[in-house]
Each structure stands twice: as structure tokens, then as C-alpha cells.
Amino acid sequence: MTSSTRPRTAVGIRRPADRSRDLALVAVFAALVSALALTPGIPVGGVGVPITLQTLGIMLCGAVLGPWRGAVAAALYLLVGFLGIPVFANGNAGLGVLAGMSAGYLISYPAAAFVTGWLTRAGARRGRTVLGLVLGVVLGGVVLVHVAGTVGMAIAGNLPPATAVKFDLPFLPGDALKAVLAVLVAVPVHRAFPRLLRR
């Protein structure tokens, strides 16, 4: 085969197989978040927002898929729920959830997956994948989600900021544990598939 007939593989040109794989990964992780969200929730605090495993799924979207695919997977999960399929906590669905106390948490998910993935990829490019993962799940999967969730509770419940923070605090220990689990899952995945985080 001469150079004139060789298929082009220039950097930045995505092959159809790559795009198909990306779409499949996005769909699989959106389904993973849906499945984790449907595990029985544990209501905590004074507002009835349940503890579920869906934030673990969001952390894994970014930690495994990287920033863009992770954010798209999280956005796809939200889109499916907004369209009426009961994939939110306690089997909820529809745009009505945006008026509820958990709206801030939900809205933050694409950004949380993006930040988690961006920091993970940045760490991997410097040979520090574990450090990137830890920073990603903490800043993206915990801090960003909790800040957005607290603001959402304050707005939806017309609560003073200090009260919203108090209602949010019971979620922190569980999300810290989820962050540890996300790192423990993602590290061997990236060792086995080091190209997952490429641009």
C-alpha cells in the first residue's frame, strides 16, 4: 500500500470505531448511574433528601471516562430522567425534580464528572494517576456536588445558608467513602486500559 492510499490517522481525526466506542461507553456509564440511583435510598437530615449510590456513579463517569465523555454520560443520565424515565432516587422522574430539595445535587452532576475527569487526566499525563484521581473525586465528586446541593436546598426550601449547610453535612461521610471506592475501582481500570483517558 502506497502512502497515497494509506488511511489517514492524523492526530485529532476520530475514526468511526472510536466514536462508536465512545458512544457505547457513555451509554454504559449513564446506565450505571441509573442503576446505582435506584438502590434503596436512606433519608437523612431534615429535608428528606436520601443517601444513594448515584454520586458514586458520577465519580466513576469522570474518573474512568475522562472529562468530556464523563460529563456527557452524566448529562445523558439527567436527560433520561427529565424525559420521564424513573432513574432518579426513589424512582422519581420528570422536570418536577428541579423544584425539589435535591435539584442542586442533580444539576451539578455533569460539571462534577467533568472536573473529576479533567483532574484525573491531568494527573495521568504527569504520571500521577492516583493523585489525579484523588483530587478529582474530592473536588469534583464531593466538594462541587455538595456546594451545588447546599445552594439548591437553600433556594428550594427558602432556608438560611447555615441551615442548608447543616442539612447537607450528614451526606459528607458517605460521599467520602464513595470517593475512596471510586479511586479503588478506577486505578486498576486505568492500569488495564491506559488509553481510556486520551483526548
Image (cartoon, rainbow, N blue to C red):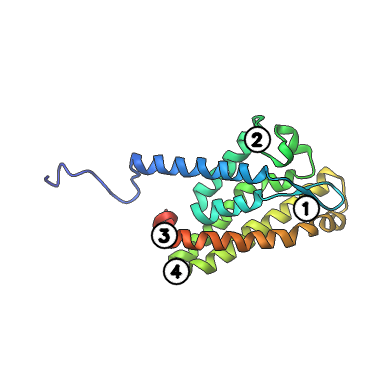
Q: Which-is-in-front pick, marks 3 and 4? A: 3
Residue nearer the viewer, 152 or 59: 59
Marks 1 and 3, the one that precedes in the sequence: 1
Marks 1 and 2, the one that precedes in the sequence: 2
Q: Position of residue 71 (x, y in %)?
A: 55, 47
Which picture quadrant has residue 107? top right
What amino acid type should be assigned to the residue bearing mark 3? Ala
Marks 3 and 4, the one that precedes in the sequence: 4
Marks 1 and 4, the one that precedes in the sequence: 4
Q: Dot 4: within a 10 Å radius of its alpha carbon, few (fewer than 14), some, or many (20 or more) residues?
A: few
- Which SS class for mark 1? helix
Reading the image, the residue beneath label 4 is 126
In the displayed structure, does residue 192 sit left or right of residue 82?
A: left
Q: Position of residue 196 (x, y in %)?
A: 43, 54
Q: Are marks 1 and 4 in contact (CB under 8 Å)?
A: no
Residue displayed at 52% across by 67% down: 130
Q: Which-is-in-front pick, marks 1 and 2? A: 2
Reading the image, the residue beneath label 1 is 150
- Which SS class for mark 4? loop
Q: Position of residue 114 (x, y in %)?
A: 56, 52
Reading the image, the residue beneath label 2 is 81
Residue displayed at 22% across by 43% down: 7
In the rendered view, tell whether residue 34 sits above or below residue 185. above
Q: Position of residue 134 (x, y in %)?
A: 58, 66
Reading the image, the residue beneath label 3 is 192
What amino acid type should be assigned to the residue bearing mark 2? Gly
| Cα–Cα gap, marks 1 and 4 | 34 Å
Residue displayed at 64% across by 48% down: 109
Q: Dot 1: within a 10 Å radius of its alpha carbon, few (fewer than 14), some, or many (20 or more) residues?
A: many
Q: Dot 3: within a 10 Å radius of its alpha carbon, few (fewer than 14), some, or many (20 or more) residues?
A: few
Marks 2 and 3, the one that precedes in the sequence: 2
What amino acid type should be assigned to the residue bearing mark 1? Thr
